[in-house]
Amino acid sequence: MKIKNICCIGAGYVGGPTMAVIALKCPDINVTVVDMNKEKIEKWNGDLDYLPVYEPGLREIIAQVRNKNLFFSDKIDESIQKSEMIFMAVNTPTKTEGQGAGMAADLSFVESCAKNIALVSKNDKIVIEKSTLPVRTAEKIKTILKKYNNECHFEILSNPEFLAEGSAIEDLFKSDRVLIGGDTTTSGQKAVKALVNIYSNWIPIDKIITTNVWSSELSKLASNAMLAQRISSINSLSVICEKTGANTVEVAKAVGMDHRIGSYFLSPSPGFGGSCFQKDILNLVYLCEHYGLNEVAEFWHQVIKINNYQRMRIVHKVEELFKKDRKGRITILGWAFKKNTNDSRESSSIYISNSLLNMGYKLNIYDPKVTEERILDDLNNLNKINNNPAYTSTSDKLQIYNSLNESINGTDVILILTEWDEFKNFESDAKIIDTRNIYNGNKYFKL
Ligand code: NAD
Ligand code: UGA
């Protein structure tokens, strides 16, 4: 089956970069990324310096393929109709209400995509789950597609995305593996082959693995759970290091040099952030509980609990410094959940800063890529839950800066929370708490 037109629903951190790379590597295919958020689409079509997603290398690709074979549009129905293959790359956050609230994935965005596809399609389509989903979601999607369209045949594939933000383009170019789950039926295998053909334009064939749909869905949750587990493991060891005089970085190096363990994902931190680790593990915990696997659920839940513990541990370090006298100013360096992204979803900076503000500390905040508006939204969204008054950046309590030097001027304590390169070297008399082990000068505390 020759694919000529691809539609991707969801122009976010996955949809944008992934489709940009497919368009670049498959010049014969027209790729249209659609989104219900018109403002986002306008930004994708606008100034290359202000794309909605910041990723190293993305700007250059967009400049090369935009309006050649990559299009951003809000005409969702039209794009679905003309495409043989449709990716669903919409958000799947943790449910905030109803059954499973606080744990299960909110599938309403995926479900509404499926309904939309069914309602407007006039011929057969391959529908691809790009979003991270609980195991057996494909069954639900199939039911929705059938309910709203009995005429066309929809083949559902699972093709989870493994890119990490900040290195998305590099990850997409040189994926460790591409995973495609499909039905074992003839039409299922035909659809799998069509997707394999697309990726094989740049991914070596031995790195494209095909499985059944359920293995593919579960492998994505399992990968994120295993990665996050390593961070909670090293963060929990960092507490023992502090008590015993061992050095976490030395321990991580010694442990990681065992090739059976490996050196990746052993950097201690103020806790992992990002839109996915927490939600995907909670989703896995919910799945375990659903099947009555309480011990397994508790095992994975502990990964989240250690993450929250680590965040509060950093707050207590600051408390220790001020010796309960909460006068003085703290500079928070870094709001993004990791370097090289403008994304701050679930960043530890939000939780640590919010706790400090609620305790009465005054904060300066600086991040090279996260906007002031975003920082205030992050804090105020968390504050709303506690019915606290909204923060503004002009209050004495909270100042948001556009430069590192201004943000650290006259401050008492500097708390490095994101590992941006520019935080490696700067001059200051303030006490420095370095939760990323990057600062080259004297530190009061490091993990
Ligand atoms: P995102 O919030 O950045 O983007 C999702 C987009 O989908 C939004 O722009 C939203 O407006 C749009 N959308 C939602 N419902 C829609 C609908 N019915 N019609 C049209 N547009 C709709 O999310 P993201 O970070 O790109 O993540 C998407 C999925 O990919 C999630 O399931 C996530 O777990 C998974 N994932 C994310 C990453 C990552 O690094 N962010 C990596 C791998 C997998
Ligand atoms: C993560 C996975 O790495 C991707 O494979 C996956 O596709 C993605 O989630 C997803 O499903 O959304 P991402 O969250 O973008 O990617 O970034 P990571 O590099 O995994 O970092 C996540 C968090 O863990 C960051 O806050 C980072 O600082 C922290 N981290 C990472 C550590 O604290 N220590 C480490 O050693 C590594």
Image (cartoon, helix red, strand yellow):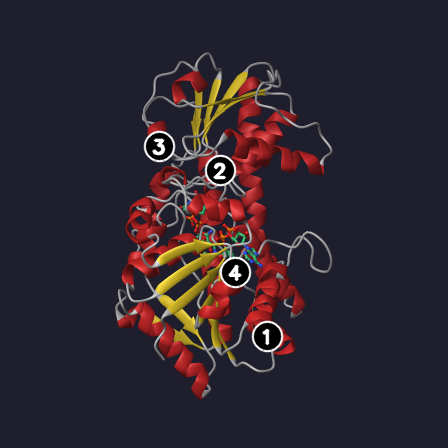
Q: Residues within 10 Å of mark 2 (few under 14, many from 20)?
A: many
Residue receiving disc 1: 145
Marked residue nearer the N-terminal end (3 or 1): 1
Distance from Cα at disc 4 to Cα at disc 1 = 17 Å
Q: Secondary structure at mark 2?
A: loop
The residue sitting at 42% across, 53% down in the picture is: 16
Number of on-image labels? 4
Task: Tell me: 134 left or right of 246.
Answer: right
State yes or no: Cβ of the residue under disc 2 lies below 8 Å from any atom of ligand 2.
yes
Distance from Cα at disc 3 to Cα at disc 1 = 50 Å
Q: Is residue 340 above or below residue 187?
A: above
Residue receiving disc 4: 76
Q: Secondary structure at mark 1?
A: helix
Residue 50, percent from left and from top: 41, 38
The type of residue carrying mark 4 is: Ile
Nearer the observer, 61 or 412: 61
Distance from Cα at disc 4 to Cα at disc 2 = 40 Å
Residue 313, percent from left and from top: 55, 34
Marked residue nearer the N-terminal end (2 or 3): 2
Residue receiving disc 2: 270
